[in-house]
């Protein structure tokens, strides 16, 4: 309905059609008034002409409305105002004509003002849609470029690795390249095309899929469970995602060593009003006896602890059936 109203007035580029409809509408109004004349008391010369003028003004615009108003006034004056069948000025003619001009003029002006306001609103709405499309395009391009730049940096590190012979250095460069590529994918997934932050489930599911895909372990599956009220700010989402990715990579490397299949559960929930819990559970081998997280020389676990501290939270590994990496954040 709103879109149809925005198209008014109709036939603006087809004047012959518009004025032809105007003449037809006035003729119909005159005929109806003529048919009803025997049953009407005196004093209603414009009864059927008022709706015709209003309808024409609404559908076809101010100019056809004025033409309809003038034609209707002359017909009513000639056929239905005493003395009839003449344009003579009787005792009540000036008052009747003044009343008609006042009502019709007011109606046409109000309709015209409404159509102008409606046209302005339609232009502003279209401008807003254009700006929104432009903003979406620019945001997508910026997001794409940032991600590509990070991917290029990861590729340069991989190229640099070819000139390194030390095994430990090559492993370190591989890890750095993997993490840069992961950050690039995270930055692309963090926002939707309109720039709004994604729901955490929509954000974590492709992230977990990417980590498993990057590991080359097709037999490992991941289940993501996120409470609807478990939300984090966009600024905290990237470090949170990196911690989850590091926990998953640690589970794949150590928990599923010498195993082709396994399951990783990523669960994000609210613990009361003040804490968020993010658990990464696997059904792998579990922690070795005597394992001490603080004494571990794993770079990935050190990164996870450091990022957790930056978020004013904590990161720990818990024993159980398999292993659980738990991140606790302030809500």
Image (cartoon, rainbow, N blue to C red):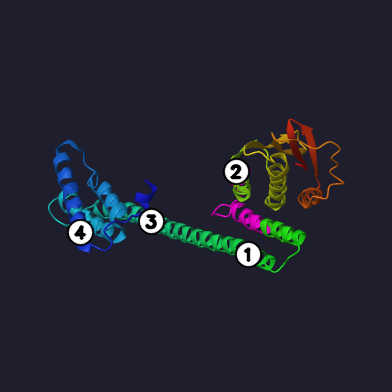
* Label placed on residue 155: 1
- The answer to whether residue 230 is above or below residue 303 is above
Residue occupying the point 31% across, 56% down: 9
What secondary structure is found at the residue carrying circle 2?
A: helix
- Which of the two marks, 3 or 2, is nearer to us in this view? 2
Residue 64 percent location from the top left of the image: 26, 59
Verify CB contact (< 8 Å) between mark 1 and mark 2.
Answer: no
What secondary structure is found at the residue carrying circle 4?
A: helix
What secondary structure is found at the residue carrying circle 1?
A: helix
List the residue tagged with mark 4. 17
Residue 1 percent location from the top left of the image: 36, 45
Residue occupying the point 73% across, 30% down: 321
* Label placed on residue 205: 2
Q: CA distance from mark 4 to mark 1?
A: 67 Å
**Earlier-in-chain disc, 2 versus 4:** 4
For mark 2, does the 10 Å Cα neighbourhood hold few (<14), some (14 to 19), or many (20 or more) residues? some
**Earlier-in-chain disc, 3 versus 2:** 3
- Which of the two marks, 4 or 1, is nearer to us in this view? 1
List the residue tagged with mark 3. 115
- The answer to whether residue 198 is above or below residue 130 is above
Q: CA distance from mark 1 to mark 2?
A: 25 Å
For mark 4, does the 10 Å Cα neighbourhood hold few (<14), some (14 to 19), or many (20 or more) residues? few
Residue 228 appears anywhere in the view = no
**Earlier-in-chain disc, 1 versus 2:** 1
Q: CA distance from mark 2 to mark 4?
A: 59 Å
- Nearest the camera: 211 or 227? 211
What secondary structure is found at the residue carrying circle 3?
A: helix
**Earlier-in-chain disc, 3 versus 1:** 3
Start-end of magenta stretch: 180-206
Q: CA distance from mark 3 to mark 2?
A: 49 Å
Q: CA distance from mark 3 to mark 1?
A: 59 Å
């Amino acid at each position: 309905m709103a879109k149809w109203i925005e198209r008014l007035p109709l036939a603006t580029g087809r004047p012959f059609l518009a004025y032809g409809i105007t003449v037809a509408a006035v003729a119909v109004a005159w005929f109806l008034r003529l048919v009803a004349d025997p049953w009407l008391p005196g004093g209603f010369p414009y009864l059927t002409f008022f709706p015709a003028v209003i309808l024409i003004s609404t559908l076809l615009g101010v100019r056809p409305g004025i033409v309809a108003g003038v034609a209707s006034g002359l017909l009513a004056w000639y056929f239905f105002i005493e003395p009839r069948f003449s344009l003579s000025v009787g005792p009540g003619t000036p008052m009747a004509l003044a009343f008609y001009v006042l009502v019709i003029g007011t109606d046409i002006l109000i309709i015209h003002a409404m159509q102008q306001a409606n046209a302005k609103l339609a232009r502003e709405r279209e401008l807003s849609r254009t700006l929104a499309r432009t903003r979406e395009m620019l945001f997508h391009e910026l997001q794409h470029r940032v991600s590509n730049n990070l991917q290029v940096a990861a590729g340069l590190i991989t190229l640099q690795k070819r000139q390194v012979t030390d095994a430990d250095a090559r492993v370190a460069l591989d890890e750095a390249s993997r993490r840069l590529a992961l950050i690039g994918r995270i930055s692309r997934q963090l926002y939707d095309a309109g720039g709004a932050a994604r729901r955490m489930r929509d954000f974590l599911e492709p992230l977990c899929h990417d980590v498993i895909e990057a590991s080359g372990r097709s037999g490992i599956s991941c289940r993501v469970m996120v409470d609807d009220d478990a939300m984090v700010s966009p600024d905290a989402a990237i470090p949170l995602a990196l911690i989850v990715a590091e926990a998953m990579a640690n589970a794949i490397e150590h928990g599923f060593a010498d195993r082709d299949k396994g399951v990783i559960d990523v669960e994000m929930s609210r613990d009361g009003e003040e804490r968020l819990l993010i658990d990464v559970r696997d059904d792998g081998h579990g922690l070795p006896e005597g394992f001490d997280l603080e004494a571990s020389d794993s770079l990935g676990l050190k990164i996870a602890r450091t990022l957790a501290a930056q978020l004013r939270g904590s990161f720990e590994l818990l024993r159980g059936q398999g292993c659980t990496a738990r991140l606790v954040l302030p809500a």
